[in-house]
């Protein structure tokens, strides 16, 4: 059997020619995704999969080539962004005037330290032979955070350093390896506010060493081939940050806020059809007792149909299971919800459907309906506790009323009580204590607005506002739940104890307002400075307690 599989793989390598160059993915943190999104809303490019956005570098180049053909429709700033990203992603643009390697390279680049502070694309090392290549990047960040209210003397520092190795071999196989190790000091509230991903790292949560520290590690292999014109098939095994489903603020299905998963991912694209399937492993909530730690598994399928200049419509499903590897969930060609029921309904299954419009230039509307567990049996009574539903609706308006390079984004999210919870606490929709879906959690809603402005290819600004309402469970002085209103993902609905009715925003009512201003400045390529101001107000209406905090932080990033 193994010999047959190896023969098939070898056959694919030697019989399928691929004219693309770099198969490895562009990390989701890269600002090129924002540029491509703007070009999609402007209808410069015909499609962009922000529901499953991890793109190979060659896919980014294809989008950039498509944008290049319509360069006459771009603003001056957009043209500069296009030139910037062409140099970064298109191998044909690599030459001594655009690219440098600190360690001497056999590629057509400048070598040595002399260009390290120039505007060239920078690598520690770049090498290519017979279309096989390797690129090594240095990574690093430094944050300084200072509280403005309630205590101006409170501050924090966050710092890390690492490296990334990536490339493509045999024309079809992309690889990536990266590691980042860091430390932090100062006020923990400021640390977590300025750098939320730190809350889902083991070393930070364990906090057993004399220095507060954290680490991130990623790596994968991705195989891609095109058996027919316009058809693409990919298979990826490894670990990186992924998201799933639509959402201008965060996705209801998989937001990417929780710790990165180890996963096997399959993708198929042909014509209007775009299908993907993920089987990944996550971790349960942290416990000092090693015997209480456990693994949970995340499974997802998604099918999307794209109708050019009209709309995209998609349907997806997810399953959370802690019972070990279930062979049925390794099958991408099956309806997981019905499979979960046939396995005696022991896991946490969800279904979601979404739509995204494209028939109006510069203006996009999208919406998602999310159904946790039950298949449409309770929608006639929206107050039932078993009616675990959520939805999002919003719009993306690029260059409103003719204002170039400006984006206006608005979205409303509503999540009913008990969504993401499960009668088996190991199957909650969480990983390492962080909700894998939308972070506002159950029994809450949110209005999200954001203004983004590209002053130039070097300077970007944004202003974000969130108004969130939540209904929390009522507890006594010891923390024991006195009345369950479905406001805690770890406290499920129990029919023999809890009320069969669950009214939205019932319980302890907390309203919060969050404002954030950001300005990003990249004086030369690969060296990025961020300045951020945040103001957060939490108002416990039930108990009449109001808390407000504000802070400012700066960040320097190397090869962000």
Image: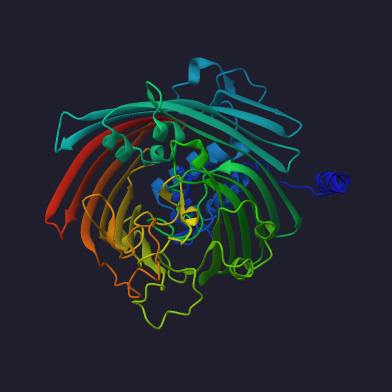
Q: Identify the residue at the far left of this view.
A: 544
Residue 97 is at least partly visible in this image? no
**Residue 395 in the figure: left or right of residue 9:** left
Q: Is residue 192 above or below residue 387?
A: above
Q: Is residue 26 above or below residue 70?
A: above
- Residue found at the far front of this picture: 496
Q: Quadrant of the C terminus?
A: top left
User: What residue is rendered at 53% in x and 37% in y?
Assistant: 88
Q: Position of residue 491 (x, y in %)?
A: 38, 58
* Chosen colour scheme: rainbow
Residue 186 locus on image (x, y percent):
27, 27
Residue 187, compared with residue 339, is above or below; it is above
From the viewer's perspective, is 483 left or right of 18? left
Say which of 416 and 481 sits in front. Answer: 481
Note whether residue 376 is visible: yes
Report the front residue among 378 and 6: 378
Q: For residue 166, what is the image quadrant?
A: top right
**Percent coordinates x, y for residue 243 in the rendering:** 50, 52
Q: Nearer the viewer, residue 381 or 251?
A: 381
Number of labelled discs?
0
Task: Name the outermost residue toward the bottom.
Answer: 380
At x 73%, y 50%, the residue is: 225
State the image coordinates of residue 154 (x, y, percent, origin top left). 19, 30
């Amino acid at each position: 059997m193994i010999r047959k599989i190896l023969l098939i793989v070898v056959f694919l390598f030697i019989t399928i020619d691929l004219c693309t160059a770099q198969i490895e993915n562009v990390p989701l943190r890269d600002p090129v995704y924002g540029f491509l999104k703007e070009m999609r809303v402007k209808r410069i490019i015909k499609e962009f999969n922000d529901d499953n956005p991890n793109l190979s570098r060659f896919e980014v180049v294809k989008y950039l080539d498509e944008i290049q053909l319509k360069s006459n429709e771009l603003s001056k700033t957009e043209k500069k962004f296009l030139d910037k990203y062409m140099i970064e992603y298109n191998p044909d643009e690599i030459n001594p005037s655009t690219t440098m390697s600190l360690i001497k390279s056999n590629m057509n680049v400048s070598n040595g330290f002399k260009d390290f502070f120039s505007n060239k694309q920078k690598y520690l090392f770049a090498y290519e032979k017979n279309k096989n290549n390797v690129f090594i990047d240095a990574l690093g960040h430094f944050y300084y955070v200072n509280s403005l209210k309630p205590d101006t003397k409170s501050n924090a520092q966050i710092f890390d350093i690492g490296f990334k190795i990536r490339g493509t071999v045999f024309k079809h196989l992309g690889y990536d390896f990266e590691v980042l190790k860091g430390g932090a000091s100062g006020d923990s509230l400021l640390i977590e506010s300025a750098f939320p991903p730190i809350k889902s790292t083991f070393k930070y949560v364990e906090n057993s060493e004399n220095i507060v520290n954290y680490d991130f590690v990623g790596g994968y292999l991705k195989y891609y081939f095109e058996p027919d014109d316009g058809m693409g098939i990919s298979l990826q095994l490894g670990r990186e940050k992924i998201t799933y489903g639509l959402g201008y603020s965060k996705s209801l299905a998989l937001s990417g806020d929780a710790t990165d998963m180890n996963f096997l991912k399959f993708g198929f694209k042909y014509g209007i059809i775009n299908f993907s399937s993920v089987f990944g492993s996550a971790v349960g909530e942290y416990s000092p007792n090693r015997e209480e730690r456990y693994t949970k598994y995340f499974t997802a399928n998604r099918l999307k149909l794209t109708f050019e200049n009209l709309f995209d419509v998609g349907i997806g499903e997810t399953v959370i299971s802690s019972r070990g590897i279930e062979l049925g969930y390794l099958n991408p060609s099956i309806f997981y919800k019905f499979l979960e029921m046939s396995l005696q309904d022991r896991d946490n299954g969800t279904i979601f459907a979404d739509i995204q419009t494209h028939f109006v230039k510069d203006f996009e509307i999208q919406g998602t309906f999310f159904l946790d567990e039950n298949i449409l049996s309770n929608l006639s009574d929206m107050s039932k506790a078993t009616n675990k539903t959520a939805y999002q609706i919003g719009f993306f308006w690029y260059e409103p009323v003719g204002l170039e390079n400006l984006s206006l984004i608005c979205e409303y999210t509503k999540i009913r009580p008990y969504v993401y919870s499960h009668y088996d606490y190991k199957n909650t929709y969480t990983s390492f204590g962080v909700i894998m879906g939308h972070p506002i959690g159950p029994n809450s809603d949110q209005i999200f607005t954001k203004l983004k402005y590209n002053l130039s290819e070097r300077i970007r600004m944004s202003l974000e506002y969130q108004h969130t309402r939540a209904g929390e469970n009522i507890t006594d002085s010891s923390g024991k739940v006195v009345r369950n209103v479905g406001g805690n993902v770890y406290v499920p609905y129990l029919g023999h104890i809890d009320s069969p009715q669950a009214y939205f925003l019932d319980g302890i009512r907390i309203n919060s307002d969050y404002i954030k201003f950001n300005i990003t400045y990249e004086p030369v390529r690969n060296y990025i400075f961020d300045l951020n101001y945040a103001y957060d107000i939490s108002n416990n209406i039930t108990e009449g307690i109001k808390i407000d905090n504000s802070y400012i932080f700066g960040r320097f990033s190397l090869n962000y």
